[in-house]
Amino acid sequence: MDDALILKYASPVPRYTSYPTAPHFSEAVGQAEYQSWLEAIGPGEALSLYAHVPYCDRLCWFCACHTKQTLRYEPVASYLNGLHREIATIGGRVNRQAKVTALHLGGGSPTLVRPDDLIALKRAFSSHFEFSSDCEISIEMDPNDLDAARHDALAAIGMTRASFGVQDFDPVVQKSINRIQTYEQTRDAIEASRARGVGSVNCDVLYGLPYQSLSSLEATIDAVVSLAPDRVALFGYAHVPWMKKHQSMISDESLPGIVERFAQMSRAADMLVAAGYEAIGIDHFARPGDSLAVANREGRLRRNFQGYTCDSAETLIGLGASAIGQFRQGYVQNMPATGEYLRQVENAGLAAVRGYMLTPDDRLRARVIASIMCDFAFSFSRIKAEFPELAGAVVEEAKLWRARDVDGLTTIEDGVFSLTERGRPFARSVAAIFDTHLQSGRGRHSVAV
């Protein structure tokens, strides 16, 4: 892969965890639309739930999540009261015969929540929603927050998958991103989770971090592999200080260049595959027996705001400040500011402030982009069957792109538009050619490698 090609396709584009992406949400969709979408959920429909905990006891400078630092528990306790109120309101509007197939607690740092409050939160969900017997309960974990009581509480609420943020084990890199976390802490936390029956462990690793080198990343990958996680997410650090001011603590000069980022990504991916992991989409790796790897082989891989998933639920309900929900009709996002979120929930039980109503063309392009991000391909006949009146335009766009693709990133064979092995690292850039909203200029994005 020559440097010129890497630079050519590194232009900033969305990560495509949705289409259209969040910068295109507006106040045209709010509480009224949200309520009607909740009430339209039918009996027996599968649901995913996401609850956002926007607090950390330290602020990692690389983080682009909606979160804030607090050294006091009172704001967390107050926030949880509001979250309980929102859970009750939404549960009262959703058909009780709908089945929750996945619950994800993210943040922020959900594991800073006290043990009794973790148990009370799960009890609130169970009181207002019907959970399937095989529901996946996944939680983002910070080893610095964990103790025996919290591990016990997480086991008590039925956690099935623990997701540990590793980022990088190199002390210099950790200091530069304000995330001090030793290998031993991480190992002990993983072992404690497994000892309590957690069947799946995920580790997040970042490349493109300040002062990170190819050798330091190799050492981190070796250390992660020694922990034997079931899944590894290999994310590129998104440097967006215009959106997250605390990232200005990371100087541009300390960051690897685009070509070096690409080398880090490629080397880490090669090491994970050599260690027995299967590559999933653009940035995930899983052991062959893991449900994500099975779904990938069977063509059931999906993508939502939490990344790649094998959860088949079409509806994702987001709870908490800034949380985004996904429905057949469109997307809805809660108020990001925590104080205003609590005020709205107290007054109305809901805090939706913006969203997007999908058009037929959006649904077509969402399907095509998701297929590229998950399968690196899409079938002309399948989209024509699903969108008979609209698919022709996308097919022509694909053919035009292929005719101009002098770099050999794509191919069309037997009516299937596919990315070549050379093109797969640039899947985001290829997906972007079908994004009719991208040219509006709304939103700034991270580099595509």
Image (cartoon, grey):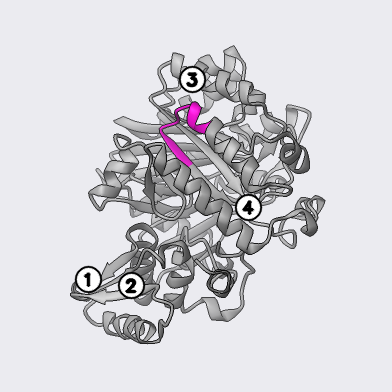
Q: Provide residue 262's location: percent of width, then percent of height.
A: 56, 59
Pointers 4 and 3 in contact (C-beta within 8 Å): no
Label 1 neighbour load within 10 Å: few <14, some 14-19, many 20+: few
For residue 111, say whether it is visible.
yes
Q: Amino acid at mark 4?
A: Tyr
Pointers 2 and 1 in contact (C-beta within 8 Å): yes
**Circle nearer the viewer, 4 or 1:** 4
Cα distance, mark 4 to mark 1? 36 Å
**Residue labelled with disc 3:** 193
Cα distance, mark 4 to mark 3? 27 Å
**Residue labelled with disc 2:** 364
Q: Give the mark nearest the N terminus, 2 or 3.
A: 3
Q: Give the mark nearest the N terminus, 3 or 1.
A: 3
Which SS class for mark 4? loop
Above or below for 69 versus 66: above
Residue 402 occupies quadrant: bottom left
**Residue labelled with disc 1:** 386
Residue 385 occupies quadrant: bottom left
Cα distance, mark 2 to mark 1? 8 Å
Specify whether residue 228 is painted magenta.
yes
Which SS class for mark 1? helix
Q: Give the mark nearest the N terminus, 2 or 4.
A: 4
Label 3 neighbour load within 10 Å: few <14, some 14-19, many 20+: many
Is residue 119 or residue 299 the one in the foreground? 299
**Circle nearer the viewer, 3 or 1:** 3
- Residues rendered magenta in the picture: 224-232
Is residue 108 or residue 413 the one in the foreground? 413
**Circle nearer the viewer, 4 or 3:** 4
**Residue labelled with disc 4:** 237
